[in-house]
Amino acid sequence: MEETYSTPAIVLKREAHREFDGRVLVYSPQKGKLDLVARGMLRPSSKLAAHLEPITLINLMVIRGKNRHYVGSAINVDAYSGIKSDLNKVYYSGLGFNLFNRLVHLEHADGELFTLLISFLQAMEKTADPEWLLQAFSLKLIALLGYQPDLYHCAHCQQELVAGANHFKSEGGEIVCVHCRPEREAGIVVALSDGAIKVMRLILSEDSPFLEKFQLPEEIRLEIIGIIPKIVEYSVF
């Protein structure tokens, strides 16, 4: 007899699998990331397809097979229409999901990661700045996975960072003090504002990682949008 279980889950990705089946990646709080086959999903008469769109929260029943696990049923809980009606939000949500898929292994269950995904989607529905939201999500995600950058000490000498004297080294994604800034690499080492460091610290310290109500000066916003992808790249990959 096939074993089944039910769980809430967020649909991360789906694609065709064989002639009429689909392959679906979801993330659930108890089971982590699951790679499932949705039998008959591509048939015109299938009722599953509408419930298995990416960027959707579902109640999912999983059937454990001998070699693969299958979607038994899926019921839409939240389709996040505020995202799907805006192509810009769909784009940045997709980038966030792609990063999540790259970093999170199958069956890595973590309730905090599930909560982060839910918070990300809820905030994305409301935000007027999806690009900023993606970067805040990315920084919080790598921190939860154990790659939190040190925003308090120089990456080279380990001395505490002093206000007004810090730099960002794009090759390596590091924050260095003025004494450790290599003069010969001036093209890839730029001054880092105290405001940017403060905001990144806030992202990692607040229960809500996206600071939706925070009035962010445009120069700091642009600074952080340029820095966080480099921190992610060199911290994780």
Image: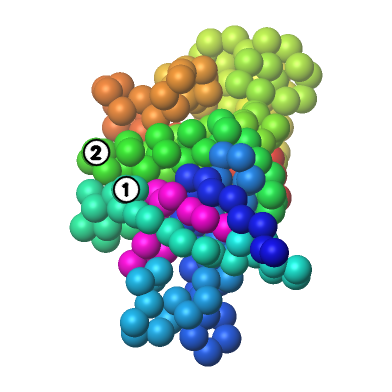
Q: Residue at x 73, y 12 (%)?
A: 159
Q: In which quarter of the image is residue 181?
A: top right
Q: Nearer the viewer, mark 1 or mark 2?
A: 1
Q: Quadrant of residue 175?
A: top right
Vertical relation: 24 (above or below) 218: below
Q: Residue 123 carries which label?
A: none
Disc 1 residue type (three-letter): Asp
Q: Which residue is drawn at 48% across and 80% down?
A: 40
Residue furthest bottom in the image: 19
Residue 225 appears in the picture as rendered: no
Depth check: 65 or 126 in front?
65
Badge 2 is on which residue?
Answer: 126
Badge 1 is on which residue?
Answer: 78
Q: Residues within 10 Å of mark 1 (few under 14, many from 20)?
A: few
Q: CA–CA distance between discs 1 and 2? A: 14 Å
Q: Residue at x 35, y 54 (%)?
A: 76
Vertical relation: 102 (above or below) 154: below
Vertical relation: 64 (above or below) 184: below
Disc 2 residue type (three-letter): Lys
Looking at the picture, how far across and down is residue 168, in whole percent? 59, 32
Q: What stretch is highlighted in magenta?
A: 50-62
Looking at the picture, how far across and down is residue 163, in whole percent? 53, 10
Color scheme of the displayed model: rainbow
Vertical relation: 103 (above or below) 35: above
Looking at the picture, how far across and down is residue 188, in whole percent? 60, 43
- Residue 58 is left or right of residue 106, and the answer is left
